[in-house]
Amino acid sequence: MLSILFLYLIPGIALVWVSAEKLEKYSVLVSKSFGLSPFFIGSTVIAFGTSAPEMLTTLFAAVENKGGMIIGNVVGSNVTNIALVFGLTLLVLTLRNINFRSNVSNLNLLLLLISTIVVWAILSYRPFYFVSSIILFTLLISTILSWYKSNEEFESEDSIENDNWAIFKLVLSIISLIFAAWLITEGALQILSNFGVGELFIGFTILAIGTSLPEIAASIALALKGRYEAVAGALIGSNIFNGLFVLAIPGLLGREELMMNTWVYDKWIHLLVLLLFISLIFITYLKITKNKVLSRSANISLCVLFFSTYLYSLMLVFE
């Protein structure tokens, strides 16, 4: 077990943390050089960057025919993003006496809710089939187009100086992220083969937490800078990318055989209900904080609710 940790998981998770941060930075630089708007950069490039580990680990898991691990990664990452990442971010803000004020449009809140419901519907039917993947991918393109046409201003990172090597550094960060994703996936497979732990548990825990590190790093960094309004937008974008693109990868690759003996809907119904529940809580909180500042005790209570929900989700997977 120690050899797996030190050879695969710890180096992989550390490399994901560093590579994803660089990927976000240089993606923004390259995007600005092409004249893309701050909102479009934030809701697509940054969200895409933080979801890149999920995409890559899903790709490697699909090659290894680990369908349960893929779904565990997607659902687990989305639960982690809201219950753990946003919970930690809100806790940091509350302890620093920073009032959280959301500036997320109703359109984006609706898109998050729709994507969550569509993912549930796809998982209840045929998650790895080509037609299912086309539906997910089409909805993703429609979402990106709505973001592009939206006049809502997205809070972006502070201006970054021009870097003539930005494209080269972007490519290098992508290569590093691919290698990190392979390390995490290989470590998870080693645990799966050596200890007989289920695919769903591995996907929901090791892969989901490991690949959610970019969201954790970005969200806490933004919170410490007082850029708390950008946190919600980044998490919404990441969850939408996870559900609509990451889940679509196996079907787009023609890996329908992953459906066989790797996915039992009845085992996941409780986790899908839990994901919808915390998504609704998250959406409601963002809606309320557009016009109202909640008390310290209310924010602490919400943090407790998020953390308790996350622990309960782990109990459901472990059973």
Image: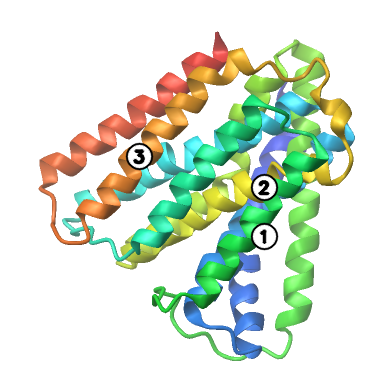
- Point out residue 220 in the picture as x, y percentages from the top left corner: 40, 55
Q: Secondary structure at mark 3?
A: helix
Quarter of the figure with residue 105: bottom left
**Amino acid type of the residue that numbered disc 2 sits on in the rendered structure:** Leu
**Amino acid type of the residue that numbered disc 3 sits on in the rendered structure:** Leu
Q: Nearer the viewer, residue 230 or 44?
A: 44
The residue drawn where x is 59% and y is 73% is: 25
The residue drawn where x is 53% and y is 19% is: 269
Quarter of the figure with residue 145: bottom right
Q: Which disc number belongs to residue 19?
A: 1
Q: Which disc number belongs to residue 280?
A: 3
Q: Secondary structure at mark 1?
A: helix
Determine crowd level at label 3: few under 14, some 14-19, many 20+ residues with C-alpha closer than 10 A: some
**Amino acid type of the residue that numbered disc 1 sits on in the rendered structure:** Ser
Q: Earlier in the sequence, mark 3 or mark 1?
A: 1
Quarter of the figure with residue 156: bottom left
- Point out residue 294 in the picture as x, y percentages from the top left corner: 13, 50
The residue drawn where x is 16% and y is 56% is: 97
Q: Earlier in the sequence, mark 1 or mark 2?
A: 1
Q: Which residue is mark 2?
A: 136
Q: Nearer the viewer, mark 1 or mark 2?
A: 2
Would residue 296 be found to the left or right of residue 114 on screen?
A: left
Q: Looking at the image, can residue 209 be seen?
A: no
- Marks 3/1 in contact by CB < 8 Å: the verdict is no
Measured in 3D between alpha carbons, the distance from the residue under mark 3 to the one under mark 1, in whole angstroms, is 31 Å
Q: Secondary structure at mark 2?
A: helix
Q: Nearer the viewer, residue 120 or 305?
A: 120
Q: Looking at the image, can residue 287 be seen?
A: yes
